[in-house]
Amino acid sequence: MDIDVPHRLRPRGARLLNAAAATALALGGSAVADWSALAQGAEAKVSAATSAVATVPTGLLVFHTYVSYADGSGRLWVHDVGAQTTTDVSAGWVSGGLLRDPMNGVISPDGRYLLFMAISEGEWNVFAWHLDTADDPVNLTKNGDPGLGLTWGRNEDPKWSPDGSRVYWKHEGDIVTADVDIALDGTPSLSGRRNLTNTPWDRTANTGEDWMPYPAPDDSVVYYTTGVGVDADIWMVDTTTGTTTAVAATPGVQEYYPVLAEDGTLYYARWASTSTRDDEVWARSTTGVHAPAPFNLAGANSSDPWPVPGTTWVVFVATESDGFYHLYAGDSLTGNTVALATLGLDVPGTNILGPAYWSGT
Ligand SMILES: [Ca+2]
Ligand SMILES: [Ca+2]
């Protein structure tokens, strides 16, 4: 089996995933959680400042867990902020042999589908699951699909277009896109695939890899990461002309995982410096100024930012002394940082990664 090389060094844990311990966890005592208020007195880095916008809207927070990258322990979770429940939606798919190591989930703008990547047929593929149904997830990038014109290979890092009509993902080291078609019975499929980048990928040397796309609200450009490790930069490609432009390209510093906030701020992860290779969440303002976010944890790796729509909060993950990544919420205005485990949202003994927030329609 040809498995992708992890882009980041993931800590290796000794314990196995304990899925049962994490079902139906409570996030807080109210239907609308106030992360800042709930964190008072909790074991979290909380500044003296009070959050200007502390209320978190109801919605769904998707994330994935694994002990070590692609080791077969991967699970995909949906946390309902309003209902205060956390569900491993992937348990049956994994135990039934449909797929393994699901990760990088994102919910469609209309809330109907969960898009993610997982291994099946010996390779990474992009799946969509009709949320809250007993339907199996549909493999949207099934190898040899004549309608999609795919060659056999890796399909990863899927994202919805802002209106849900398209999907962007990485196929064999390039950013590609295709239209979403929904059959009368609700079954999703893709058509009309085209490449947005065309840089040859050397699978052995691992050069020329474009990954982790994130589209602008009008689909005019798609942000993405190019290169890995010390060579990783963030670029954007014009979806009409194909022109590519550097966005965050500091030499000798890994820059990756671009995610756009509603106000136009571009969040991403990068090493602190060429010599200090701790990941930090950074932000590029709408005026083009790049700076570390005020909520990074000292001496830890902070990454995988996802702004919560309608708030100043950014959900992200950071390493702790147990060697695993855990969920955090950071206030981009005040720097208040809340460990969501202190509110009961945790899956002990595994890495929690790839949070994506859907705030509802
Ligand atoms: Ca490429
Ligand atoms: Ca760089």
Image (spheres, rainbow, N blue to C red):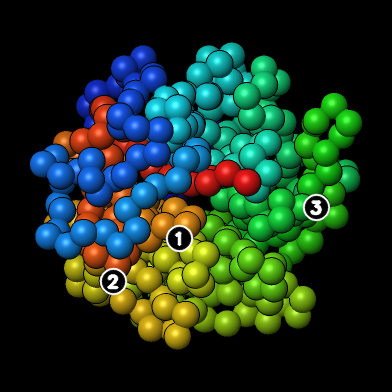
228 up-or-down from 361: above or below: below
Q: Which residue was labeled with disc 1?
A: 257
Quadrant of the rendered image containing residue 217: bottom right
Image quadrant where residue 184 sits: top right
Q: Residues within 10 Å of mark 3 (few under 14, many from 20)?
A: some
Q: Amino acid at mark 3?
A: Asp
How far separated are the C-alphas under marks 1 and 2?
Answer: 14 Å
Kind of residue sitting beneath label 1: Tyr
Pointer 2 with pointer 3, Cβ within 8 A: no
Depth order, front residue of 316/234? 316
Q: Residue at x 67, y 17 (%)?
A: 134
Which residue is depicted at the point 52% across and 64% down?
A: 262
> Residue 179 — which label?
3
Name the residue tied to disc 2: 292
Relative to 49, 3 lies left or right:
right
Precedes in sequence: disc 1 or disc 3: 3
Amino acid type, callout 2: Pro
Find residue 14 and report its horizontal and vertical position in percent.
Answer: 22, 27
Residue 60 vs residue 19, the one in the foreground: 60
- Viewer-closest of 115 and 264: 264
Badge 2 or badge 3: first in the primary sequence: 3
- The x, y position of residue 236, in whole percent, is 58, 74
Location of the N terminus by quadrant is: top right
The CB of the residue at mark 1 lies under 8 Å from ligand 2: no
Say few, some or many: other residues with alpha carbon within 10 Å of mark 2 (under 14 / 14 to 19 / 20 or more). Answer: some
